[in-house]
């Protein structure tokens, strides 16, 4: 999907549908199978496995407290699948364009800028984590102790704070005060409208009793 | 002991690089401008990046390490002394070698990047490695420290040492030069023959070549000797 506005609309609609009921989740899964390239984040299998384990644990707790654990597991897994698709679809700068398009050159621009900076930070943390993990493996041969993790995690926080300070300095030096002017342009794929309409339809089916 | 690159293709995002050849025992210099793929090769040789095509084979390599461009990534000690100990080394000797004597109780992450680089390089060079990969080891170092580490690198007798850098002021004595040309890692051959084939040599080597000098190696001392010979 090329148009970020329709990607966002589809993501919200399908997440709501999947969270609302198992049927909604099933339809959202069908949408993901038919309307996306069906790419699983396999290169991030450790993170995906960690997240899935967390969802499984919560599902067990839900089941133990009298709720429908398997349904919860299925619904949240589909929500995560949709989120992973949306994250993979994003391109640099489109959140700024999206914010400005939706809420204008002041509030929208600010929100878009914050979102872009947040994504940039996540990518920075991701890169740092990969390097830290590899450096630790080289040094200790894979034997990771809590003692060796403390400086590594401390470095992660420090680097993030440094990046934020540098970014703040750059914005200040460039004279940024509030808002900005931007005329976002969006391109739309031939099936974008149809896919988004289906996603909204699924949300309506799942949410309307 | 060697590493074989058999029609290897490496990919990081949209960036792609191809490589073929063999790294044998000795000191290898891999050069190329910023963004040409030196770090990508370093990660692949160290085993952190798998090729999308081709194979990286190894013979006789039992120990390896990679000095990352940012020394902070290597830190696992809470003090400078603890950091040296985490490499299995004696703090007093290493701290002295890194010019950090008497500062063993300091937090490594409060040091400047140059100080941390000196410490990490001193720790790495104090140990024996079959395969030692150094990705931009001269970043954040002043000329005196670049020269000190160059001398230590050039003096390495055993194992494969691969130095990846765009440094053009201070370089160690090397056995072979490699260059990244238009997305491909190319071996220029052994030194000194490789120097003539080098498309982007450092300024001091280019100046010597322009004046008809042919240095025996790539250090400033070698270039000076070549120029002296030229002047007769």
Image: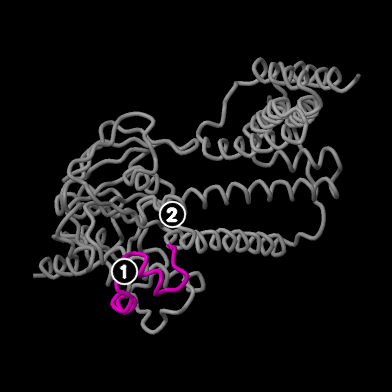
Q: Secondary structure at mark 1?
A: helix
Task: Please identify the residue farthest to the left as the structure is shown.
Answer: B232
Rendering colour mode: one colour
User: In front here: A46 or A36?
Assistant: A46
Q: Secondary structure at mark 2?
A: loop
Q: Position of residue A179 (x, y in %)?
A: 82, 52
Residue drawn at (27%, 72%) of the image: B148
Residue drawn at (43%, 36%) of the image: B11
- B81 is within the stretch colored magenta: yes
Task: Please indicate whether residue A87 sits to the left or right of residue A138 in the image.
Answer: right
Alpha-carbon span between mark 1 and mark 2: 23 Å
User: Image quarter for residue A75?
Assistant: top right
Residue drawn at (47%, 63%) of the image: A147
- A166 is within the stretch colored magenta: no
State if disc 2 and disc 1 touch (CB < 8 Å).
no
Q: Position of residue B47 (x, y in %)?
A: 34, 43
* Quadrant position of the C terminus of chain B in the picture: bottom left
Q: Residues within 10 Å of mark 2 (few under 14, many from 20)?
A: some
Task: Give the magenta part as a residue range.
Answer: B75-97
Position of B139 relative to A132 (above/below): below
Position of B90 relative to A163 (above/below): below
Task: Please indicate whether residue B48 sits to the left or right of residue A184 in the image.
Answer: left
Residue drawn at (55%, 63%) of the image: A154
Task: Please identify the residue farthest to the bottom as the structure is shown.
Answer: B102
Residue ID for mark 1: B122
Q: Position of residue A192 (x, y in %)?
A: 73, 20
Q: Position of residue A185 (x, y in %)?
A: 75, 33
Task: Output the chain of dot 1.
Answer: B
Residue ID for mark 2: A144
User: In front here: A14 or B115?
Assistant: A14
């Amino acid at each position: 999907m090329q148009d970020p506005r329709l990607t966002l609309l589809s993501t919200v609609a399908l997440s709501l549908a999947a969270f609302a009921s198992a049927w909604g989740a099933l339809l959202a899964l069908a949408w993901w199978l038919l309307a996306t390239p069906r790419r699983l984040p396999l290169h991030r299998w450790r993170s995906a496995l960690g997240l899935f384990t967390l969802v499984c644990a919560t599902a067990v707790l839900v089941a133990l407290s009298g709720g429908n654990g398997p349904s919860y597991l299925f619904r949240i897994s589909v929500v995560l699948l949709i989120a992973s698709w949306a994250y993979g679809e994003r391109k640099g700068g489109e959140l700024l364009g999206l914010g400005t398009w939706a809420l204008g050159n002041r509030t929208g621009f600010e929100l878009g800028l914050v979102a872009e900076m947040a994504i940039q930070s996540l990518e920075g943390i991701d890169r740092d984590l990969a390097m830290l993990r590899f450096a630790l493996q080289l040094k200790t041969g894979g034997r990771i102790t809590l003692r060796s993790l403390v400086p590594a995690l401390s470095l992660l926080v420090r680097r993030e704070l440094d990046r934020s300070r540098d970014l703040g300095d750059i914005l200040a030096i460039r004279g940024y005060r509030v808002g900005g002017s931007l005329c976002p342009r969006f391109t739309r794929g031939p099936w974008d409208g149809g896919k988004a309409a289906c996603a909204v339809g699924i949300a309506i089916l799942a949410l309307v009793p | 002991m060697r590493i074989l690159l058999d029609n290897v293709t490496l990919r990081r995002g949209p960036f792609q690089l191809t490589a073929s050849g063999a790294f044998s025992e000795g000191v290898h210099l891999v050069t190329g401008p910023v963004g040409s793929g030196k770090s990508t090769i370093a990660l692949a040789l160290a085993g952190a990046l798998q090729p999308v095509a081709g194979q990286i084979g190894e013979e006789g390599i039992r120990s390896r390490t990679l000095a990352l461009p940012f020394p902070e990534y290597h830190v696992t000690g809470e003090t400078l002394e603890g950091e040296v100990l985490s490499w299995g080394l004696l703090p007093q000797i290493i701290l002295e070698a890194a010019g950090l004597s008497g500062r063993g109780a300091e937090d490594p992450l409060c040091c400047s990047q140059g100080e941390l680089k000196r410490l990490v390089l001193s720790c790495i060079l104090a140990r024996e490695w079959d395969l030692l990969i150094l990705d931009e080891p001269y970043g954040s170092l002043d000329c005196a420290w670049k020269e000190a580490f160059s001398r230590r690198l050039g003096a390495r007798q055993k194992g494969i040492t691969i130095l990846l850098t765009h440094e053009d002021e201070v370089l160690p004595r090397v056995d072979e030069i490699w260059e990244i040309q238009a997305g491909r890692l190319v071996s220029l051959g052994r030194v000194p023959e490789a120097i003539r084939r080098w498309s982007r040599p450092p300024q001091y080597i280019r100046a010597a070549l322009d004046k008809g000098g042919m240095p025996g190696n790539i250090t400033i001392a070698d270039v000076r000797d070549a120029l002296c010979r030229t002047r007769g």
